[in-house]
Image (cartoon, helix red, strand yellow):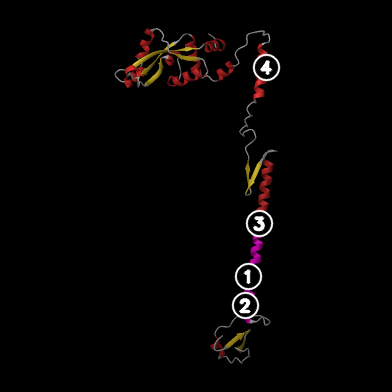
Amino acid sequence: MTDGVVVFNGVVMTEDGVPIEDDGRALERRGPQMPALPESTPLVGGVFGRLNKASSAAFELGKEVTGSAGRLTRQFVTEAEHLVDVALPAGTPRIVVHAEVVEDEPATQQTPIEPPPPTAEELRRAGDRLLARSAESRQGVATHPAFQYILEQLAPDEARILRLLASGPQPAVDVRTNRPFGVGSEAVAFGLSMIPEVAGCRNPERITAYLGNLHRLGLIWFSKEPVELHRYELVQVQPAVAEAISKAGRYAKVIRRRIEVTAFGAEFFDCCFTT
C-alpha cells in the first residue's frame, strides 16, 4: 500500500476498495505487489486463515509423528519382552521397570530363610528321646556325637598341637610387671611357649588363635600348675619372652604355667587320630 493505493489480485484500488485505472505511473508509487489471494478470501482474514491452516497442519503432522514414535516404541518393547521370554527358562521370575527387564536372582542363589528356633515342647521331646536311647541295650560303644563337629572346626596346625599335647603337658609362661604385693601389676604377655615350634606348625604366628580355638572346643586348658622347672629354661630364652621381659621393666615377673589336654580332648584324640 502506497499513498492510499492498495493492490489486490493485480487490481489497483483505493483504500475504500474502488478500482482505479493503472496508467503505469502508479506502479512507481505502489512499490512491490503483494501475492495474489483468492477472490473469495478477505485480505486480513486470508492471511490469518492461511497461518491458522499452516499451524493446524503442523500440529496434525506433530501428532502423527508422535503417534508413530509411540507405536514404534511399543513395538520395540514388545519384541524385546518376547526375546527375553524366549531366552529365560520357564518359571524364571522377572521384573520390568521402564521397559527394562530386571531379572531376580535364581531361587538357588537366594539367601535361605532360617528355620524358626525349636519350641520348648520340641526340646522336651528331643530330650526324652535321648533318655530313651540311653536306656537301650547297646551292641557297641558309640562315639561322642560332638566329635564329627569338632573335626570340622579344627585347622591342620591345631591337629598338630593337639597331638603334641596328647603326649604330655607343655611349659608356658606369663610375663607381668612387678609391683609391691601385686597391686597395679599388669600383664605384658601370657601363654608364651615353644608349642608351635615343637609341634611343627605351618603358621606359628597364629598360635594364640590356635590355642584359643582348642580351648573353646574343650580340648585343652591352661593350668596354673607348673611342670618340671628345668623345662622352662629353654622357653625363657626365646626372643618373644625376652622382649616381653624387657617391656615389663627392670623387675619383671615371670609366672610359670602349663598347657595340657583335657580328659575330653584325650578321648577325642584317641578316637579320631591314629596314635
Q: How far is the residue under mark 3 from the one under mark 2?
A: 34 Å
Q: Mark 4 falls on what kind of element?
A: helix
| Dot 3 amino acid type | Gly
Q: Which residues are magenta?
A: 43-72
| Dot 1 amino acid type | Ser
| Residue 57 is one of the magenta-drawn residues | yes
Q: How far is the residue under mark 1 from the one under mark 3?
A: 22 Å
Residue that badge 1 annotates: 55
Quarter occupied by residue 53: bottom right
Q: Residues within 10 Å of mark 3 (few under 14, many from 20)?
A: few
Q: Residue at 58%, 19% (x, y): give it.
A: 149
| Dot 4 amino acid type | Arg
Among the two numbered marks 4 and 3 on one chain, the one whose residue lies closer to the N terminus: 3
- Tag shown at residue 129: 4
Quarter occupied by residue 49: bottom right
| Residue 142 is one of the magenta-drawn residues | no
Q: Residue furthest right?
A: 90
Q: Is residue 242 left or right of residue 7?
A: left
Quadrant holding the N terminus: bottom right
Residue that badge 3 annotates: 70
Along the viewing direction, whichever of 250 and 88 lies nearer the viewer: 250
Q: Mark 3 falls on what kind of element?
A: helix
Do we see residue 59 in this rendering?
yes
Q: Position of residue 159 (x, y in %)?
A: 51, 15
Q: How far is the residue under mark 4 from the one under mark 3?
A: 70 Å
Q: Mark 1 falls on what kind of element?
A: helix
* Majority secondary structure in the magenta region: helix
- Tag shown at residue 47: 2
Do we see residue 252 in this rendering?
no
Q: Residue at 35%, 15% (x, y): give it.
A: 254
Along the viewing direction, whichever of 30 and 145 lies nearer the viewer: 145
